């Protein structure tokens, strides 16, 4: 018989204290038992983070208020608990780790002291005993050279190490409940895999109940015992992992699963005989840090990268953060100047020509960035944003506006959106606008730099579909930069795998992503969460292969 | 750290060199005969010749510059044209009141303003916040002489708690020094309290939205520790910048306060020198002010590295 650690019953959270406020959380009930991991899954705005912050008592005061139901931690009601009591419970009975390890630690305090703070606030241990306990905990989360890291400031540590510090801080007092709010979303896949394993391991050793919040079905498949699916503040469906992935009862869950791109590459298209539109030849970018006195430092961000892209094809550059994939993209578009090597765009060498001479060639290559919330000027109407490029190249205002309307319809938005501002659109719609803006110049090459990474899976699927459709219709070539192998498998004809600025492996997507030759590519594929599941077909990959053979 | 300090001090040398060159040329490049400018309208030819000789104006420009810098380095800033006293001595007499007031003002301002800013940010959006911000608007908008005369009227004339005007050196006893410096300090600190409180509040509001503040709260530590240990230290960099520049401004720019309270500081010395076209004094003041700015900026940068381990040079 296992005990219920967290019991959320019919919880309602509203905006403001007014009785008629909008409900952000609308009557959800979930339980997490000892030694169990419950995955709370949902897209952005589903209320999963609000649920966890309500439990911790960390909701922003006055703006979000729990107005109904109950949250019980080992039988103790939290919603009516005093601030003082909540402070006592935090870190001792319930602890939380957050999404962004890069910003979750105080940058001006050594990490050891940040963990020490927990012990000083909640125990009477003397300095020596506290330090022993902290070092012991740091070893449990597999940090190397614990004495050195104890005295280090956060910026000296990698993202994975920082998240380990966060976990050590959360678990040092052996709380009953650990809330993990997207703890691996900001990490690279290989690091993500290690952190997920670590959480599993610590949970086994300490018997902790884990409430794990994520939007990533792959991660769910890796770590969950049970799954609760949320949507717009309501609970859609809950059940054991296998049941939810195999037999989702609700339409929403089915759609959510069906939107997860498969790791199995799509059927390869025929080899193209179309002309090459973009070529990078031994492209390198070296950043030199100049020092006033003493020696400067050199960082090789891209090292002799060679790639070719034909008309109507999609080339993916995949790699983890710091692999140099974005640097390559930016060099090709000449947003930054390459240190050496060449870029041929539609047969013309553009790597070393001056910015003025480059100007007529700019329209042939356009870029879509990762974050649709920041890549559109908030004070310029959508129409003006789209029309600005053509107008720069001499198209009349009226013609450019007419074209903007057509483009908006092409990307699936109403033509009258031209007069509206970016904030009136959702993330997915903004990314469509960004695509329309890029297309306005009739480019030969579209560079998509993590263009779907910030989007929810269902929206991501739509935008990928849109890119595919545009390519079929306009014959445009796409250079697609992504860290997500699933996305790469679904959209790319060829892929280039990068690590530390170098190309590790390149070739047809269907080949590289199913039979990788290089150890690094294998490791990347191996670390992809949920690689054993074929979500869209509601079955493990192994069963699918068995069925079709 | 020591290496960094030495590098920074060395880097300040060319800055001061450029300033010195500018100050030197100020007089030489003014249209007309510098000696005539210095001597004034009713000078006799003999006096002109004497000035020329004393300034070495008959030498080539580069020789003049080297001689001038050489004198500078030996602490010889020339002689005032009005009082005929060495400029160095004149400034020496005036520096203590100015530095005393600048220091006491900035200390008072920090002691009052930083807690106000922190509390305003902590109670963001409540009446406390609005009250503090209201005070700061008042501090910005009331001119310093109005505050000064009000304080004199109430505390010196009506209540007779402190003397009306003047300055006593701290070396002649703390009591008389404190009595005379308290009113100008209060008057002058008004606007700095407003400025620093606003800056602190804004910086704190930024920091309070950071993830690590949420982490700190999730640890279950009390709000005072969250505010002081986690938020304020991270908010300190912009606040220190304002305090530093405020201090530099204070030393050279407190003419009005010095006039209201009849304090013989360098602000008034500068104004008097400008009005009387006392070039040697003007030159010395420009040099001194630049030096203060260079030193204060150096101190600010050193403070950055102490406050934020990520800042390394």
Image (spheres, coloured by chain):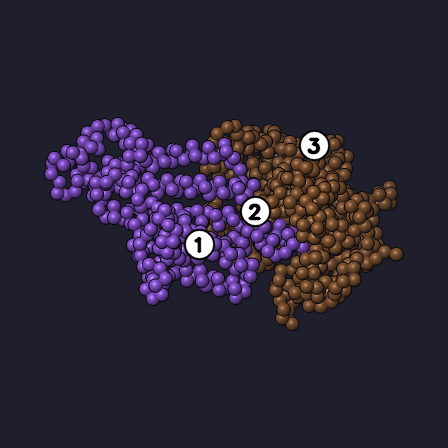
Chain colours: A brown, B purple
x and y percent of residue A204 in the render?
Answer: 81, 47
Find the distance from the CA under tag 2 to the CA under tag 1.
Answer: 56 Å
Seen from this angle, which residue lies furthest right?
A1
Find the distance from the CA under tag 3 to the CA under tag 2.
Answer: 29 Å
Q: Which mark is residue B108?
A: 1
Q: Are marks 3 and 2 on the same chain?
A: yes
Give me the residue at 38% from left, 61% from top: B141
Looking at the image, is mark 3 or mark 2 earlier in the sequence? Answer: 2
Q: Secondary structure at mark 3?
A: strand
In this figure, which residue is indicated by the disc labeled 2?
A: A438
Please tell me whether mark 2 or mark 1 is closer to you in this view. 1
Please tell me whether mark 1 or mark 3 is closer to you in this view. 1
x and y percent of residue A461 in the render?
Answer: 69, 50
Mark 2: few/some/many CA within 10 Å (<14, 14-19, 20+): many
x and y percent of residue B23 in the render?
Answer: 29, 38
Q: Secondary structure at mark 1?
A: helix
**Does A208 sit left or right of B218 as displayed?**
right
In this figure, which residue is indicated by the disc labeled 3?
A: A505
Q: Can residue A429 be seen here? A: no
């Amino acid at each position: 018989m296992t005990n219920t650690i967290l019991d959320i019953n019919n919880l309602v959270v509203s905006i403001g204290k007014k009785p008629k406020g909008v409900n952000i959380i609308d009557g959800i009930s979930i339980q997490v038992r000892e030694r169990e991991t419950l995955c709370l899954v949902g897209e952005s705005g589903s209320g999963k983070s609000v649920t966890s912050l309500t439990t911790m008592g960390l909701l922003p005061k006055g703006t979000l208020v729990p107005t109904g139901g109950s949250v019980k931690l080992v039988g103790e009601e939290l919603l009516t608990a005093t601030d003082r009591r909540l402070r006592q419970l935090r870190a001792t009975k319930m602890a939380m780790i957050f999404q962004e390890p890069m910003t979750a630690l105080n940058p001006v305090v050594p990490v050891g002291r940040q963990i020490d703070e927990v012990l000083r606030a909640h125990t009477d241990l003397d300095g020596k005993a506290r330090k022993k306990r902290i070092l012991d905990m740091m070893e449990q989360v597999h940090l190397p050279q614990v004495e050195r890291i104890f005295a280090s400031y956060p910026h000296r540590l990698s993202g994975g190490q920082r998240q380990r510090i966060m976990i050590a801080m959360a678990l040092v007092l052996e709380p009953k409940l650990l809330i993990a709010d997207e703890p691996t979303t900001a990490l690279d896949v290989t690091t993500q895999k290690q952190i997920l394993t670590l959480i599993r391991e610590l949970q086994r050793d300490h018997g902790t109940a884990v409430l794990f919040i994520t939007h990533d079905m792959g991660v769910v498949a890796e770590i969950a015992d049970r799954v609760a699916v949320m949507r717009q503040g309501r609970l859609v469906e809950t059940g054991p992992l296998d049941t939810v992935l195999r037999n989702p009862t609700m339409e929403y869950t089915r759609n959510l699963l069906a939107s997860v791109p498969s790791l199995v590459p799509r059927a390869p298209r025929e080899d193209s005989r179309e002309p090459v539109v973009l070529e990078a030849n031994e492209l390198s970018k070296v950043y030199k840090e100049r020092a006033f006195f003493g020696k400067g430092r050199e960082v090789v961000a891209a090292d002799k990268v060679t790639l070719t892209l034909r008309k109507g094809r999609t080339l993916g550059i995949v790699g983890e953060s710091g692999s140099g994939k974005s640097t390559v993209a930016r060099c090709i578009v000449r947003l930054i100047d390459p240190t050496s090597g060449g870029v041929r765009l539609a047969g013309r060498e553009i790597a070393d020509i001056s910015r003025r001479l480059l100007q007529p060639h700019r329209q042939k290559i356009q870029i879509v960035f990762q974050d649709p919330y920041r890549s559109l000027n908030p004070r310029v109407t959508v129409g003006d944003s789209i029309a600005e490029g053509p107008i720069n190249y001499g198209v009349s205002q009226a013609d450019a506006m007419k074209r903007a309307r057509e483009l908006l319809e092409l990307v699936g938005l109403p033509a009258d959106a031209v007069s509206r501002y970016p904030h009136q659109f959702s993330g997915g719609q903004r990314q469509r606008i960004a695509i329309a803006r890029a297309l306005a110049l009739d480019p030969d090459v579209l560079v998509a730099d993590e263009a779907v990474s910030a989007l929810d899976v269902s929206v991501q699927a739509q935008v990928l579909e849109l890119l595919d459709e545009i390519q079929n219709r306009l014959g445009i070539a796409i250079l697609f930069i992504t860290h997500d192998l699933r996305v790469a498998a679904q959209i790319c004809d060829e892929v280039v795998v990068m690590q530390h600025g170098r190309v590790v492996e390149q070739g047809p997507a269907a080949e590289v992503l199913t039979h990788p030759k290089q150890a690094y590519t294998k490791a990347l594929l191996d670390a992809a969460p949920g690689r054993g599941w074929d979500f869209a077909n509601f079955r493990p990959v192994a069963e699918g292969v068995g069925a079709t053979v | 750290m020591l290496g960094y300090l030495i590098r920074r001090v060395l880097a300040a040398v060319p800055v001061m060199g450029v300033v010195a060159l500018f100050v030197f040329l100020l007089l030489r490049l003014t249209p007309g005969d510098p000696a005539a400018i210095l001597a004034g309208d009713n000078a006799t030819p003999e006096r002109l010749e004497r000035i020329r000789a004393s300034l070495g104006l008959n030498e080539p420009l580069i020789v003049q510059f080297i001689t001038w810098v050489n004198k500078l380095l030996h602490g010889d800033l020339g002689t005032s044209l009005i009082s005929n006293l060495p400029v160095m001595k004149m400034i020496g007499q005036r520096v203590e009141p100015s530095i005393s007031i600048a220091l006491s003002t900035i200390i008072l301002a920090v002691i009052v303003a930083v807690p106000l800013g922190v509390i305003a940010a902590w109670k963001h959006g409540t009446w406390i916040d609005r009250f503090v911000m209201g005070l700061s608007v008042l501090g910005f908008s009331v001119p310093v002489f109005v505050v000064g005369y009000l304080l004199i009227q109430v505390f010196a004339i009506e209540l007779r708690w402190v003397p009306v005007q003047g300055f006593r050196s701290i070396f002649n006893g703390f009591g008389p020094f404190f009595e005379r410096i308290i009113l100008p300090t209060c008057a002058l600190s008004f606007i700095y309290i407003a400025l620093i409180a606003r800056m602190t509040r804004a910086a704190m509001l930024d920091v309070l939205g950071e993830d690590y503040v949420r982490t700190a709260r999730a640890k279950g530590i009390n709000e005072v520790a969250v505010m002081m240990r986690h938020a304020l230290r991270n908010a300190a960099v912009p606040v220190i910048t304002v305090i530093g520049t405020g201090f530099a401004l204070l030393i050279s720019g407190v003419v009005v306060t010095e006039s209201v309270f009849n304090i013989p500081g360098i602000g008034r010395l500068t104004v008097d020198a400008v009005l009387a076209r006392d070039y040697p004094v003007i030159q010395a003041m420009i040099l001194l002010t630049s030096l203060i700015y260079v030193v204060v900026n150096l101190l600010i940068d050193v403070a950055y590295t102490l406050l934020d381990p990520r800042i390394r040079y």
